[in-house]
Every structure is written in C-alpha cells, then in structure tokens.
Amino acid sequence: MTAAAAAPVATAIDWRFAATRLHARLLDERDRGLVHALYTDPEVMAHVGPALSPEDADAFFAKLLRWNAEIPVRARFWAYCDLGEELSYIGLFSATRVADAPSTWELGQMLLPQRQRHGYALEISVRILDLLMSDVWGLGVEVAVGRHAGENTRLL
C-alpha cells in the first residue's frame, strides 16, 4: 500500500483539544502574528534553523494554512493558548506524517520565549500523544517521533 493510499480522509474532524492549562485549535488567519513572532525570532529559531524574514514568514504561514486544509491529512498545525483565552498564545504544535512510513508521525513545537520553561511543552505533548495514539482523529499513528535540541535539557 502506498503512503497516499494509506493516508486517511478527514473531512469532519474536530481538531480542537484542551489540557489542564491550555487549549489548542488548528492555525487560522488570526495566527499570522504568532507565526511571525516565532519564525522571525532568532532566539526561538536557534533550535530550528535560520530566522525567517517577515516576507518569508508570511509565505510559510500561507503554506501551513494550506497543509492544514489538505485531505488526505499529511500534517496538522495548531496554535495553543491559555485555557479560556482565545488569543493568549503559548506556541505552535505540529504533527507531520513521515513520507516513507505512513504510520509514523513527527511532532514538533515552538514556544514564545516568555512561555518557555513553564511546563507547557510537556503538557501539550502528553495530551496530543494521547489523542494521536488513541486514533481519535483516524490518522493511523503507530509511532510518534519528537526531537529537541541537545542544549534544551530542561523540558519542564
């Protein structure tokens, strides 16, 4: 079976979820500022790659929105905020299907500098892993992979 054939069709899925202190929803037009704040910040991007220019961040934001709308699902990107606060941003979380291993997904996240080291990364990771592995979204996830920079030793 090819990766395309194995990819799920997800037309009526509610991608929102909550955890103890936060809630997450798929990125939408309201989140352009969040993507800019993360991807143009050299401090945040030091763990990812070169910081983007504002123009490149705009183009990348448009790409993230397109990927969020794709069916079959190959990737999803969430903005997450304080519980009960619609635009009190903490960061961005991603889940991306590994092309040559359709049941393996790579997880990633970026937090605003002022939200780092408060336990949010662990909280959202645990919650999204529960959802992915329970297959509530029908993605067929069997393996979830995440990485962090070696110097990022304090995960809480």
Image: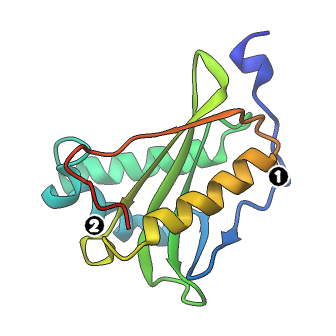
Which x, y percent locates residue 30? 49, 72
Q: Please say if 27 is above or below 105.
A: below
Please name whichever residue, 97 or 134, is drawn nearer the observer in this view of the structure. 134
What residue appears at the point 69 percent right and 69 percent down from the top-left corner? 17
What residue appears at the point 73 percent right and 55 percent down from the top-left corner? 131
Name the side, left or right, on which 144 lies relative to 73.
left
Please name whichever residue, 74 or 56, is drawn nearer the observer in this view of the structure. 74
Q: Amino acid at mark 1?
A: Val
Which x, y percent locates residue 91? 41, 67
Q: Amino acid at mark 2?
A: Ala
What residue appears at the point 60 percent right and 69 percent down from the top-left corner? 24
**Quarter in which the N terminus is drawn:** top right
Residue on which disc 2 sits:
37
Residue on which disc 1 sits:
136
Marks 1 and 2, how far apart in space?
31 Å
What residue appears at the point 26 percent right and 47 percent down from the top-left corner? 56
Q: Secondary structure at mark 2?
A: helix
Name the side, left or right, on which 78 lies relative to 147.
right
Which x, y percent locates residue 21? 56, 82
